Image (cartoon, rainbow, N blue to C red):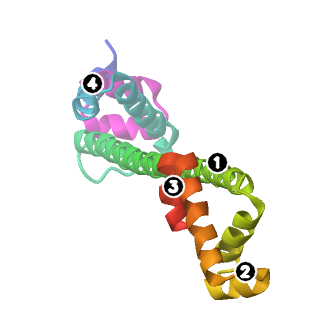
Amino acid sequence: MSASKTCTDLELIDLIKLGDEQSFAEVFNRYQSLLFNFAYKKLHDQDRAKDIVQDLFIKLWSNRATLKIKTSLNSYLYRSVLNNILNIVKHDLIKEEYVNSLQQMIDQSAEESDYKIREKDIEKLIELEIAALPQKMREVFMMRRNEFLSNKEVAERLDLSEQTVETHMKRALKVLRQRLGKLSYFLSII
């Protein structure tokens, strides 16, 4: 029977500090399953629970020469596991926030892109229908729409009466409404 099995936790820590592998194995055997169960109950993830416990024992052995335990070994080990769990939960929350933020950006970008594509398609369709108007009607419509001229200003430029300009504008809008159907709503906007 190994002498380390009868040692107290404090004695085992002193032996571990000196590099005694049997003492380290005894601490591992005493606490590994208890710490795993504790971590598993908090995380509900066996792999993560195993990793936390394994990392704890790796750090314990790697830092054995400078190990300073101010409480009991039991408290030290459980507190270390709990701190690692809290770090994982905190990291998961940050990751989840980042993923949600990224998803929002992707969704928003997709909506904006889809909207812009539809807007350009509608603009092309409207432009094609405007181009199909009779020449004078198209000229009147374009001057009113693009140059924001009044009926009087258009009449002076084209050497037409204001009444003729108004008639061309009404007919242009009527033709476009008929050809574009529901898209005619956008004509009122543009």
Q: Three-letter amino acid code at disc 1? A: Asp
Mark 2 neighbour class, 10 Å CA radius: few under 14, some 14 to 19, many 20 or more = some
Report the magenta residues as a range: 6-33
Mark 3 neighbour class, 10 Å CA radius: few under 14, some 14 to 19, many 20 or more = some
Which numbered disc flags the more N-terminal residue, 3 or 4?
4
| Image position of 49 (left or right of 128) | left
The residue labelled by disc 1 is 121
Visible residue check, residue 102: no
- Report the quarter where the N terminus lies: top left
Residue located at (34% from left, 16% from top): 2
The residue labelled by disc 2 is 160
Q: Which dot, 2 or 1, sits closer to the camera?
A: 2
Q: The residue tagged with tag 3: helix, strand or loop?
A: helix
Q: The residue tagged with tag 1: helix, strand or loop?
A: helix
Magenta residues, dominant SS class: helix
Q: Tags 2 and 4 in contact by the CB under 8 Å rule?
A: no
The residue labelled by disc 3 is 184
- The image position of residue 110, as x and y in percent, is 55, 46
- The image position of residue 3, as x and y in percent, is 32, 21
| Image position of 63 (left or right of 75) | right
Taking the magenta stretch, the answer to whether it contains residue 24 is yes
